[in-house]
Amino acid sequence: MTGRLAAVNLGVVTEAEWAGDPSGRTGIDKRPVDGPVLLRVDGVAGDFIGERAHHGGPDQAIYAYAEEDADWWAAELGRGIRPGGFGENLSTYAVDVTGAVIGEQWAIGDALLQVTKPRTPCTTFAGFWGMPDLIKRFTARAAPGAYLRVLREGEVGAGDPVEVVERPAHGVTIGQVFRAMSLEPELLPRLLDAPELPEPIREKARRRLSGSRP
């Protein structure tokens, strides 16, 4: 089955006491939009990002989350979760996001994207959902979604096919990186096999392997 975009979502300005930015504003509340949206090297045109110290930038310009994983959470929590409910720009269908290989490339619409790293849950996410234990539960589930670089800028829209056009041979996946950094430190050596993984994560893995944390 060919993967596709279920929705493209843009953040709206939300002011809340749980927002991670000192301004008290966050863009985690992302909502589906109609029509094509431009994906740029620095992010999605029209998207609001509140805390730029930890969000945005070339290595995490776009955030994708699988509709199937969202459905699991909806069943687990007994409540509906609309597209964008995880703060994702791209809601995907029939795309193995957790199993995506670091560095693999996705052709969507006019854009070319590259998988870079998993999302790390934060207190803003927990506040948005109103779940104090969300970080612990999200980590245990280990289906974090994927950040992507924009290798070629272009417009995308809901319904566009998601085609994996290149996949590195090292086989290090989004799920493995997430588990290595959180639950399964025995996987840390594998992270050094993925040159496309952002250097701050590779360096953190080296420090942990050498016995000096974090």
Image (spheres, grey):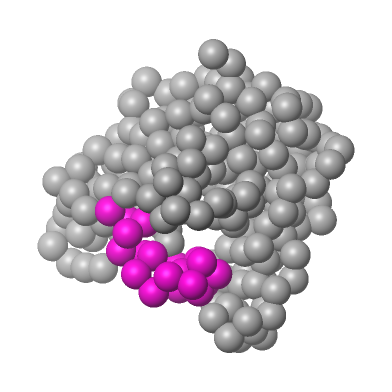
> What is the count of numbered marks?
0
What segment is highlighted magenta in the picture?
122-140
Q: Residue furthest top?
A: 1
Q: Residue furthest front?
A: 78
Location of residue 170 with respect to 25 vertically, above or below: above
- Where residue 169 sits: x, y (%)? 37, 20
Q: Which sits in the foreground, 168 or 130? A: 130
Image quadrant containing the N terminus: top right
- Left or right: where 4 falls relative to 31: left
Among the 4 quarters of the image, the one containing residue 106: top right
- Where residue 139 sits: x, y (%)? 32, 56
Q: Is residue 164 magenta?
A: no
What secondary structure is the stretch in magenta mostly built from? helix
- Where residue 214 sits: x, y (%)? 26, 68
Q: Is residue 74 visible?
A: yes
- Tell me what residue is drawn at x 48 percent, y 41 percent: 71
